[in-house]
Image: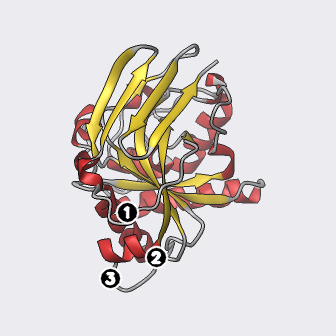
Amino acid sequence: MALAELLRARETGRPCPPVRGLLPDGDVAAAYAVQAAWVEHEVAAGASVVGRKVGLTNAAVQAQLGVDRPDFGTLLSWMDCPHGTPIDASRLLQPRIEAEVAFVLGADLDAGRIGPPEVRAATAALAPALEIVDSRIAGWDIGIVDTVADNASSGLFVLGDARVPLGGLDLRYHTMEMRRGDVVVSAGSGAACLGDPVLAVAWLANTARDLGRPLCAGEIVLSGALGPMVPVVAGDRFAADIDGLGPVTAAFR
């Protein structure tokens, strides 16, 4: 039932009520099963898996949504928006945008214990990213079960042009500023992302492996918001700059 409700919301463009009442109370594993079934549905329809995203890593975003722990979702090929190409806002129901560090993996992350050293060794490059999050749940009235079932409230994403080696970078101290037009609407740093984006990727790698869906070489990982997310409407233009990684922009029509 939960999957059917979320599919109907996507197909009609009309958000649905929360789905947490359709699943066992607080059962995050059941919610991930719904998410996996949706991914299978999309792959059967022709999409391909291109990566994962970590959600709810930022305390400000958790406070905005009333959720107290991270989650993850799956990135599909149709979510990847070319940098510099306007995005049709009608593809989304209730979009919001946040700036993140993207990790491009050069090796699988499926070991028994995955920590920062393993993440660093597996990372081929970093890129600045904008994630356009979206919810199929009306009014963003979500708990952890709702957002997990809804693919961690994934929408679309944009990667900037730069590819930067992770090397010895300490991402905790890399700052981010995002503007809508000329106005700063979000700011933060790597420390706001579970203390360090590398730690966020390690959390994801361990969690995804334990669920039987380990991270693979070639995947893109959106590691989580560096600052508060911001609502999006048609006509908006956002530009984010992450210290050491460079700019990334998104315009909506």
- Tag 3: residue type? Arg
Say whether disc 3 or disc 1 marks the residue closer to the N-terminus: 3
In the image, 41 versus 54, the foreground residue is 54
> Measuring 34% from the left and 20% from the top, which residue is drawn there?
184
Residue 61 seen in the figure:
no
Q: Secondary structure at mark 1?
A: helix
- The answer to which image quadrant residue 156 occupies is top right
Q: List the residue tagged with mark 3.
A: 113
Q: Are marks 2 and 1 in contact (CB under 8 Å)?
A: yes
Residue 151 seen in the figure:
yes
Q: Where the C terminus falls, by quadrant?
A: top right
- The answer to which image quadrant residue 147 occupies is top left
**Crowding at mark 2 (Cα within 10 Å: few <14, some 14-19, many 20+):** many
The tag on residue 109 is 2
* Residue 235 horizontal/vertical position (percent): 57, 13
Q: Report the Cα–Cα distance between label 2 and label 1.
A: 10 Å
- Tag 2: residue type? Leu
* Residue 92 horizontal/vertical position (percent): 59, 29
Q: Report the Cα–Cα distance between label 2 and label 3.
A: 9 Å
In the image, 89 versus 141, the foreground residue is 89
> Measuring 64% from the left and 27% from the top, which residue is drawn there?
87
Residue occupying the far right of the picture: 46
Q: Report the Cα–Cα distance between label 3 and label 1.
A: 13 Å
Q: List the residue tagged with mark 1.
A: 201
